[in-house]
Amino acid sequence: MELRLTVNGEVVSGAVEPRTLLVHFLRGHLGLTGTKVGCDTSSCGACTVLVDGRSAKSCTVLAVQVDGCEVTTIEGLAPDGRLHRVQEAFREHHALQCGYCTPGMIMAAVSLLREGRELDEGAVRRGLEGNLCRCTGYRGIVEAVLAVAGATAHGPAPADQA
Amino acid sequence: MIPAELAYERADSVEHAIALLGEHGDEAKVLAGGHSLVPLLRLRFARPSLLVDIGRIRELAGVSEEGGGLAIGPTTRYADLESSALVAERAPLLAAAAGEVGDPQVRHRGTVGGALAHGDPASDVAAALLALGATVALRGAGGERRLPLSDLFLGFLETAIAPDELLVGISVPPSAAPAEFAFEKFNRRAQDWAIVGCAVSGGPVPRVALVNMGTTPLRALAVEEALAGGASARDAAELAARGAEPPEDLNGTAEYRRHLARVLVRRALERALP
Ligand SMILES: Cc1cc2nc3c(=O)[nH]c(=O)nc-3n(C[C@H](O)[C@H](O)[C@H](O)COP(=O)(O)OP(=O)(O)OC[C@H]3O[C@@H](n4cnc5c(N)ncnc54)[C@H](O)[C@@H]3O)c2cc1C
Ligand code: FES
Ligand code: FES
């Protein structure tokens, strides 16, 4: 089937089998290997991307389901090589070790921050429930997201980010 | 794993979807949010030859006012139930249950109609809608029929929806006291399904429903009768597991689930009822 969608701001098209999972379309067809696969049970969140601005597990969505939609992957956060402020915060707060969960964790965090709700520690932890990290113990991750949330609370976010 | 080969059609209207289902019989499967079906396809537990995607049919999504209650389109996503002002006002129990499903990613994609049509006894919103006294509308080539939600569930993952029928609407009747509600979910890890859960809606005739206490989502009728007869919340809750045949699995024995049901129903009743 012919697909046409926007990925990281660019229109892409291609033929896929209907059974193709979105994560395999992104990684295999488009070469966007920042998005990871970490489980076979829709549990880990390593495959998280944004579909029309909201987080989704790309291992649990068929590529044909997002025909015509707007998809953002981790690569789309730093198109010109300058880190997104959530990426900056992860670096600042030691929010990663092996890094395998990080792309999905960051996309889940970006989705949560885009909701524009006021966030405290509990809300950040609940907002990241769909993402598992085997290394960090989550502390740095939560601190990184809270730091960005605090920044938005004190001033408008840059228009091109989150 | 990846799904086996299959064909895919995106339906652009209810009629189109019903025609496709009629043509392909039980070889075809409806695809809504895909958050029950895609995992089954991946494991090849489900092997339909055709998916009929209803996710883009406009008229099937969204929440509106209906006779003082709510009309809910089946492809309304959990996240949109959670954030709907109308749901918050008229059926906050449903918003609370929707907010307990899985994790944000699941709630961004999964739909309320998909949850009901799947017939999973562990569905959070199915219990909430049972407690709210919801009815559902099914449409096939032969026309539309409406049934109480409790009649939709026939057995484990088995519903009254015929292979050529579509769940096209969910109605929640008006409530005299929508703010009298509680949803309790017990699990061990944040994103998990309920080991047991419980939904209570108050008002003159309180209704109580259970998550994961049998082969289908179910009402705790013994509790409801005891309350109607004037029993205290504490005494009524003792009957929470009466007649239930809860599953046994790695998360708990049937006896453990019966215990949880009594505890959760008591907590929910004490919170919900004045
Ligand atoms: C990681 C994960 C965690 C989850 N945790 C929970 C949880 O804690 N609690 C919970 O309640 N659920 C949970 N779920 C399940 C989730 O709620 C599903 O989204 C929901 O059960 C199915 O909705 P869907 O739109 O995704 O349906 P789909 O997967 O698209 O469809 C499910 C079934 O219903 C049929 N169907 C769908 N819509 C219709 C219709 N309108 N008419 C006729 N048939 C239809 C399909 O053919 C299919 O058989 C979880 C799912 C995942 C992946
Ligand atoms: S790969 Fe684990 S949730 Fe998608
Ligand atoms: S940093 Fe290794 S899994 Fe999270």
Image (spheres, coloured by chain):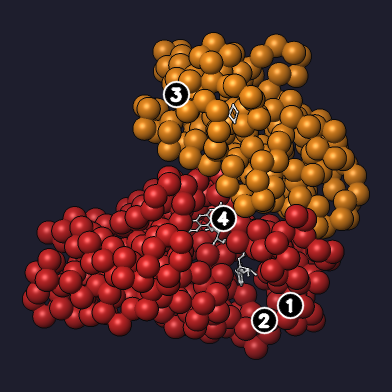
Residue at image coords 68%, 23%: A77
Colour assigned to chain A in the rendering is orange
Is B111 on the left or on the right of B263, as rendered?
right
C-alpha separation, residue under disc 1 versus residue under disc 2: 7 Å
Q: Which residue is mark 3?
A: A139
Which chain's colour is red? B
Q: Is residue A148 visible?
A: no
Task: Give the secondary structure at mark 4.
Answer: loop
Q: Is label 1 or label 3 in front? A: 3
Residue depicted at x 12% and y 66%: B234
Q: CA distance from mark 1 to mark 3?
A: 49 Å
B11 in relation to A59, above or below: below
Residue assigned mark 4 = B110
Separation of disc 4 and disc 2 at Cα?
A: 21 Å
Residue type pointed to by label 4: Gly
Q: Nearer the viewer, residue A69 or A97?
A: A97
Badge 3: residue crowd in 10 Å (few <14, some 14–19, many ≥20)? few
Label 4 beta carbon less than 8 Å to ligand 1? yes
- The residue under label 1 is B21
Judged by depth in the image, the label closer to the viewer, 4 or 1, is 4
List the residue tagged with mark 2.
Answer: B163
Task: Tell me, yes or no, whether the two marked residues, 4 and 2, touch with CB atoms within 8 Å.
Answer: no
Image x and y of residue A107, in percent: 61, 31
Amino acid marked by disc 3: Arg
- Mark 4 and mark 3: Cα distance apart in space: 29 Å
